[in-house]
């Protein structure tokens, strides 16, 4: 009995076990990678096109950050 | 009325308000160590939210971030990545730390790690790392406070006197009201600093450029080098971007003053809500900082100390009342971090050292009294560190940002069950070798191959921790089952 409990309790917590868990962690990681090199330094690293005068890099990162907050709020709403 | 009178008067008013809050907090306090150190684990969302964000954002966020935008340009918008990561870490790890604290009565990070790894050496090592690498922040914040009040008074109050007055005020309300006083003053500080930064930045951008959008257009036309990576001085390389993201998220969350906050939440839902929403405050505070820094680069180029750009702009272009209110906000930013660090260091020294090794089994009132004495001692140490010039401090301050990052493998080993557990010897060796690697990659050979030293040290730490754990004794099955079983039940509803 104890050995069985021990085996179950050592199931990895790094791997999501529910569909919502997979969606939340997968989406967060993918979006987060958009705000990390090399994407930032290769694809986002320009000033044009501007959005209302604000340079592209700043706006693109802001959009990614807002999307990441959206993922966290969705995760909370799904009780993951 | 002269600007310095208004500015100093508003700061004094603000300081009096914090003392009043400390006295009110004292009336609610019970003579109980858990109440003095953890607010009785009954803190609701609003108070917890504001104390976490106010503690996370220090004088650096208020003054230093504007200086970073001023010098290195839009690359500092990388700040969004670490603030988002703080939210995710809080959501995933903060809830687990809360659950284990509630189940097993943990008060400090060392309580949790020593219990899981069954090692007093781990307890002492974590306590020392916790204190050494955060006490330096007392020095940084106290110096920032002295500088702010010196600027506000137009040089009439010396930096040393300003540092002393503000340290004494922070220590006073902490002694009187414990963590509850820290939390209540943080509520005031969190609101004040956020409103102050936004209003200050918007007023300056309208005053100087006709509005934020016109400010951006002017920067695009006159200083386009500030709007791309890696910035005018080549600072924001990919390696620095990744390194700062890791160091300023995990490295700050694992500092004791942040981890202790998770223990204090009233329930797990509060911690999850905290994780999902803290990035809103933390990230958006850097938007006005960008306006200040980039706008300042146009109208006041060539400042010797770029961190002074915000107060310099205010004194030059804003009304005395607004300048005073905003400098009081800067004071709030520094004090909210300072009081939290004073409290955390006091908690670690009282709980992990004094109660554990010097005088166990004493009455609760005894430990509360000792905690108050320790605060007085920390006040003296903090002041001496702030006004003196010590060469070793330069090295330690360089290391301090990534110091707590070395706890990451150990904390993940407790909070994220895997197939195999790290051992006490493994995490202990990992921390020590990681700190050595940090010294090498930040001081001796700064940022090898363009990668931040924090990343190198964490990599070395993790490899050593896993390697040593493979050949040393893991925590007992009973302990692993007790702690990881608790997490299994908490996260998935049962230990199956």
Image (cartoon, coloured by chain):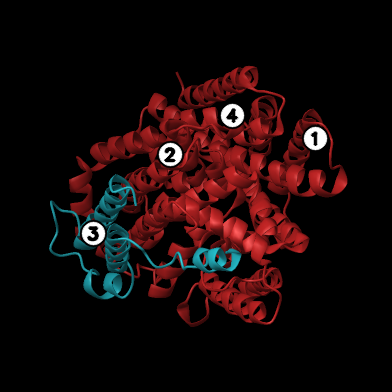
Chain colours: A cyan, B red
Q: Which residue is mark 2?
A: B270
Q: Which residue is mark 3?
A: B222
- Dot label at residue B148: none
Instruction: Name the residue nearer the viewer: B348 or A4.
Output: A4
- Same chain? Circles 1 and 3: yes
Q: Which residue is mark 4?
A: B180
B159 left or right, relative to B248: right
Q: Nearer the viewer, mark 2 or mark 3?
A: 2
* Pointer 3 local density, CA inside 10 Å: few below 14, some 14–19, many at least 20: few
For the question of whether residue A3 can be seen, the reply is yes
Mark found first going from the N terminus, 2 or 1:
2
- Dot label at residue B370: 1
Q: Nearer the viewer, mark 1 or mark 3?
A: 1
Rounded to the nearest angstrom, the CA distance separating label 2 from label 1 is 31 Å
Rounded to the nearest angstrom, the CA distance separating label 4 from label 1 is 18 Å
x 68%, y 51%: residue: B111
B478 left or right, relative to A64: right
Rounded to the nearest angstrom, the CA distance separating label 4 from label 3 is 49 Å
Q: How many marks?
A: 4
Marks 4/3 in contact by CB < 8 Å: the verdict is no
Mark found first going from the N terminus, 1 or 3:
3
- Same chain? Circles 2 and 3: yes
Instruction: Give the percent coordinates (x, y) of residue B131.
Output: 69, 52
């Amino acid at each position: 009995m104890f050995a069985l409990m021990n085996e179950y309790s050592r199931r990895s917590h790094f791997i999501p076990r529910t569909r919502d868990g997979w969606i939340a962690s997968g989406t967060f990681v993918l979006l987060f990678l958009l705000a990390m090199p090399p994407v930032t330094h290769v694809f986002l690293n320009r000033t044009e096109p501007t959005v209302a005068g604000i340079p592209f890099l700043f706006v693109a990162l802001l959009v990614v950050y807002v999307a990441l907050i959206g993922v966290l709020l969705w995760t909370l709403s799904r009780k993951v | 009325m002269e600007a310095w009178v208004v500015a100093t008067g508003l700061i004094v008013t603000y300081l009096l308000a914090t003392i009043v809050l400390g006295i009110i907090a004292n009336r609610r306090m019970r003579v109980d160590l858990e109440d003095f150190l953890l607010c009785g684990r009954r803190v609701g969302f609003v108070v917890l939210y504001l104390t976490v964000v106010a503690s996370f954002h220090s004088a650096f966020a208020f003054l230093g971030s504007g200086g970073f935008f001023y010098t290195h340009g839009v690359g500092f918008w990388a700040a969004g990545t670490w603030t988002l990561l703080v939210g995710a870490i809080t959501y995933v790890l903060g809830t687990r730390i809360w659950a284990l604290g509630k189940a097993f009565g943990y008060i400090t990070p060392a309580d949790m790690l020593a219990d899981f790894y069954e090692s007093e050496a781990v307890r002492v090592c974590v306590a020392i790392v916790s204190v050494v690498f955060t006490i330096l922040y007392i020095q940084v914040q106290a110096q920032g406070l002295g500088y702010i009040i010196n600027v506000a008074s137009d040089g009439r109050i010396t930096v040393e006197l300003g540092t002393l007055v503000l340290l004494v005020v922070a220590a006073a309300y902490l002694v009187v009201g414990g963590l509850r006083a820290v939390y209540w003053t943080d509520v005031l500080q969190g609101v004040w600093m956020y409103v102050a930064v936004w209003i200050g930045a918007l007023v300056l951008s309208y005053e100087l450029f006709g509005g934020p959008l016109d400010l951006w257009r002017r920067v695009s036309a006159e200083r386009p080098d500030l709007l791309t990576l890696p910035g005018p001085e080549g600072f924001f390389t990919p390696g620095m971007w990744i390194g700062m993201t890791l160091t300023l998220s995990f490295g700050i969350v694992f500092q004791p003053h942040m981890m202790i906050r998770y223990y204090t939440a009233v329930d797990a839902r509060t911690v999850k809500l905290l994780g999902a929403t803290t990035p809103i405050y933390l990230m958006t505070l850097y938007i006005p900082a960008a306006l200040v820094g980039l706008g300042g680069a146009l109208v006041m180029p060539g400042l010797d100390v770029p961190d002074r750009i915000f107060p310099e702009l205010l004194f030059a272009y804003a009304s005395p009342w607004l300048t005073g209110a905003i400098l009081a906000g800067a004071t709030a930013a520094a004090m909210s971090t300072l009081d939290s660090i004073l409290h955390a260091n006091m908690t670690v020294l009282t709980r992990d050292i004094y109660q554990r090794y010097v005088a166990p089994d004493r009455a609760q009132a005894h430990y509360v009294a000792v905690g108050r004495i320790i605060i007085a001692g920390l006040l003296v140490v903090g002041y001496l560190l702030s006004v003196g010039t010590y060469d070793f401090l330069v090295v330690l301050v360089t290391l301090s940002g990534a110091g707590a990052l070395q706890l990451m493998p150990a904390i993940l080993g407790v909070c994220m069950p895997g197939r195999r557990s790290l051992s006490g010897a493994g995490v202990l060796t990992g921390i020590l070798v990681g700190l050595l690697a940090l010294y090498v990659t930040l001081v001796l050979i700064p940022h090898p191959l363009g990668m931040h030293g924090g990343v190198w040290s964490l990599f070395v730490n993790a490899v050593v921790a896993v390697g040593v754990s493979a050949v040393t004794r893991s925590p007992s099955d009973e302990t692993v089952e007790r702690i990881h079983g608790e997490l299994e039940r908490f996260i998935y509803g049962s230990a199956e």
